[in-house]
Image (tube, grey):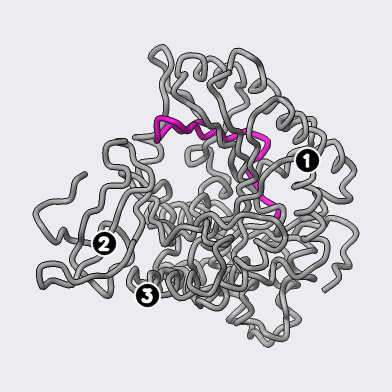
Amino acid sequence: MEAKVTRYRAYTAHQLEKLTARTHFSAEDRLAMRAVAAVLPFRSNEYVVDELIDWMAVPDDPIFRLTFPQPDMLAEPDLNRMVDLLRREANAGEVRAAANEIRLGLSPHPGGQVELNTPRLEGDNLTGMQHKYPETLLFFPRQGQTCHAYCTYCFRWPQFVGEPSMKMATDDVDALCSYLSAHPEITSVLITGGDPLVMSADVLARYVEPLLDKRFESLESIRIGTKALSYWPYRFVSDPDADDLLRLFERVVASGKHLALMAHFSHPNELAPQVARDALRRVRETGAVVRCQAPLIRGVNDDAAVWADMWRRLTRFGAVPYYMFVERDTGPKDYFAVPLARAYEIFRDAYRQVSGLARTVRGPIMSATPGKVMVDGIANVADQEVFVLHFVQARNPDLVNRPFFAKLDPSAVWLSDLEPAFGAFPF
């Protein structure tokens, strides 16, 4: 598929009526979509709308479900409440107050992101950073806290709803450098969002280049979390500063640090346009590595053949399959969640279809409060059917790679749904 988009045009909730007019949705359907978009953020762009979505397949098209609000994302009472407000044209303040009340019930910051992960320096909390694992620091640049398009499953949705109290962001590079100097155990900085690659190359460089200073010899890698390769590949090909961005990547690599783009590819359809493959090639030519991850999402990619196809394509184009995540316990999790037993079956069936080069991928993985927990399998141990699990990463490093067991529960979708099979869990 050849992409035809030549300019950037963003769409927000105000354009939902126009965007869905080409479909068979009724007026009530569109009103329900607007109601969801008043609570959970909606943003897309011309590339996603015109090149990635097959409008003849809507509402089942995977990229449509990935990016457009669906009525079932809200509990029925919440949906009815928002629909009623919009139908009677309630004032903006009343709509916003209702939306905020609903949002607070959707676990906006799962896994203790705020209360457990916020770093401190000389007694002060450092906003816009997270330090969950000893080796890794997350940094949220203020100008990068939006995206080219919002994924409906995204656990970072509080960044995009316009409520400052929910947002994590900073432009304090000096605080970042001071914290790194005080914590030489940090070997990797992940610049995340939002999407840092909505920023211009010049702005991104303000955050990246200080990390190349020789005083940060212990810093081995810089990671950039992005979905630009999927949702706006022109960022690396024909944007006015595309070459400047790639030269920045080259400077990071030349400094001796590993540069990884943590790319979110959720479906092989995102790799269909030639421009996406051109973007991957241009990034790889800088010496950066593209590592690819995404959650398992019901109705989007809950099919082993889809994952196997995607992993094979990514490997063919020089990217590295990295993680299959479990949908996090936030936002419309009940809409997208896949039971852990089914998630393991999908991962196993996809994994056996690919060559060793694609078996760099790990999953299914829950990024939970104590760490990243991987479902290794289902087994019979001491005459009991159990999940076999281990920590890929953990707040407590002693837990990493130690197996533990949970009772097999076919309906469980998250770590908190599981009960220990033998004694207590080790965390």
Secondary structure state at the residue bearing disc 1? loop
Residue at image coords 72%, 74%:
53
Indicate the quadrant containing the C terminus: top left, top right, bottom left or bottom right: top left
Residue type for callout 3: Arg
- Near mark 2 (Cα within 10 A), the count class, few <14, some 14-19 or many ≥20, is many
Residue type for callout 1: Thr
Residue type for callout 2: Val
Q: Is residue 384 above or below residue 388?
A: below
Residue at image coords 62%, 81%:
59
**Which span of residues is magenta-colored?**
129-148
**Residue behind mark 1:** 286
Answer with mark 3 or mark 1, whichever residue precedes in sequence: 1
Does the segment drawn in magenta span residue 334?
no
**Residue behind mark 2:** 388
- Residue 275, disc: none
Apparent side of residue 299 relative to residue 384 in the rendered image (left or right)? right
Answer with mark 2 or mark 3, whichever residue precedes in sequence: 3
- Near mark 1 (Cα within 10 A), the count class, few <14, some 14-19 or many ≥20, is some
Residue 27 lies, in percent from the top left, at 64, 82
Indicate the quadrant containing the N terminus: top left, top right, bottom left or bottom right: bottom right
Spatial CA span between label 2 and label 3 = 14 Å
Spatial CA span between label 1 and label 2 = 40 Å
Q: Toward which corner of the image does residue 269 lie, by quadrant?
A: bottom right
- Residue 342, disc: 3
Spatial CA span between label 3 and label 1 = 39 Å
Residue 276 lies, in percent from the top left, at 77, 60
- Near mark 3 (Cα within 10 A), the count class, few <14, some 14-19 or many ≥20, is some
